[in-house]
Amino acid sequence: MIDKSPLESSSFPTLPPSEGPATPPSVPGTPSVREPHSTLVDEIKATADKLAADGATRGDMKILSRVLRELRYAFKVFTPYRRQFKVTVFGSARTAREHAAYKQSVEFGRRMAAAHWMVVTGAGPGIMEGAHVGAGKEMSMGVNIMLPFEQESNAVISQDQKLVHLKYFFTRKLLFVKEVHAVALFPGGFGTQDEGFETLTLVQTGKRDPMPIVLIDELGGTYWKAWDRFVKDELLARGLISDEDLSLYKVTDDIGTAVDEIIGFYSAYNSMRYVRDQLIVRLNREPPDALVERLNAEFADILESGRINKATVHRLETDDEHLRQLPRLILHFNRRNFGRLRQMIDLLNKELGKPVQST
């Protein structure tokens, strides 16, 4: 049995989701009021009928049935919060409350909630509990995995309507990345390493839109610093990744730096969307012509053809009505150099974004 009494000295801020930053980007899956879903529902039913026709085993059908039920319920829970900034926090369930990393996770959760970001974790003890203790009940969400051990949810999120219980790791990992705008990783075991590398792989290959990925050591710690050396000495040195891929993550032992990295990513950049073969980058501020020219000079290598140009809302963006007024850039991105795309976003944030100061 897990002791579920969280750090009693921590106060729980109560910041409702509606008070979050203006015009947050939607995560994938935000429902459109204009597009009927009947065709997609028919496709789901047709797929189920084909399973029977294929003679699928009972075991296979049980997996698909459970996955569909799990995701349906999880989407129902997350849908009201899809226009609310959220950060996923990964880290060990075994980290004791007196450990420096646990205290760092509490402070990280507190600062993110103070900035009107919700904190999503695996809902367990250790680092997950610490981040929820800092964020407080109102700004916490949980995606728990049902295991024969380490499975009970922590006291902050237990019995909360924003807590989802799942059987499968792969559905859980989908939600951790799909439903948020940033990922923060504290020291952890195989699960944390898996979640970190998978998130990086999804962003590196464009299966997930660019977002901040921050690896947080305890003050003076070496866990992520040693990991970073391994990445550079073994992966980069062997040509298994590219220099630009190092731009996809940030290692720090300072909570203020971690929070600023996450919040600052959305200071000028808002979101992006593909419309046919064109990438539309939505911004919170319009770039001057001189900056657009600089982008064309410095990032011509990421273009399949043409130039980077200013643009207005595209007619196929009607399901993102709340982002209609934002200025945009449009480019024929090669869908390959996502590290360089991240570097372009960083430049836009540097030149257009307001200074970020964590609280």
Image: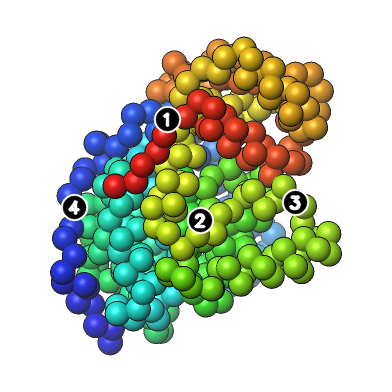
> What's the distance in space between the residues labelled 4 and 2, CA to CA?
23 Å
> What's the distance in space between the residues labelled 1 and 4, CA to CA?
25 Å
Residue type (three-letter) at the residue carrying disc 4: Pro
**What x and y, as percent, mark residue 222?**
53, 73
Q: Is residue 77 above or below residue 330?
A: below
Q: Earlier in the sequence, mark 1 or mark 4?
A: 4
Q: Earlier in the sequence, mark 3 or mark 4?
A: 4
Task: State which quadrant residue 298 falls in.
Answer: top right
Q: Is residue 45 above or below residue 10?
A: above
Q: Are marks 3 and 1 in contact (CB under 8 Å)?
A: no
Mark identifier at residue 214: 2
> What's the distance in space between the residues labelled 2 and 3, CA to CA?
18 Å
> What's the distance in space between the residues labelled 1 and 2, CA to CA?
20 Å
Secondary structure at numbered mark 2: strand
Q: Residue drawn 53% across and 33% down? A: 350
Residue type (three-letter) at the residue carrying disc 1: Lys
Q: Can residue 66 be seen in the rendering of this structure?
A: no
Residue type (three-letter) at the residue carrying disc 3: Asp
**What x and y, as percent, mark residue 262?**
45, 46
Q: Are marks 3 and 4 in contact (CB under 8 Å)?
A: no
- Give the class, few, some or many, for how many residues have Cα within 10 Å of label 3's Cα (few <14, many ≥20): few
Residue placed under numbered mark 3 in the picture: 243
Secondary structure at numbered mark 3: helix
Q: Residue drawn 35% across and 54% down? A: 119
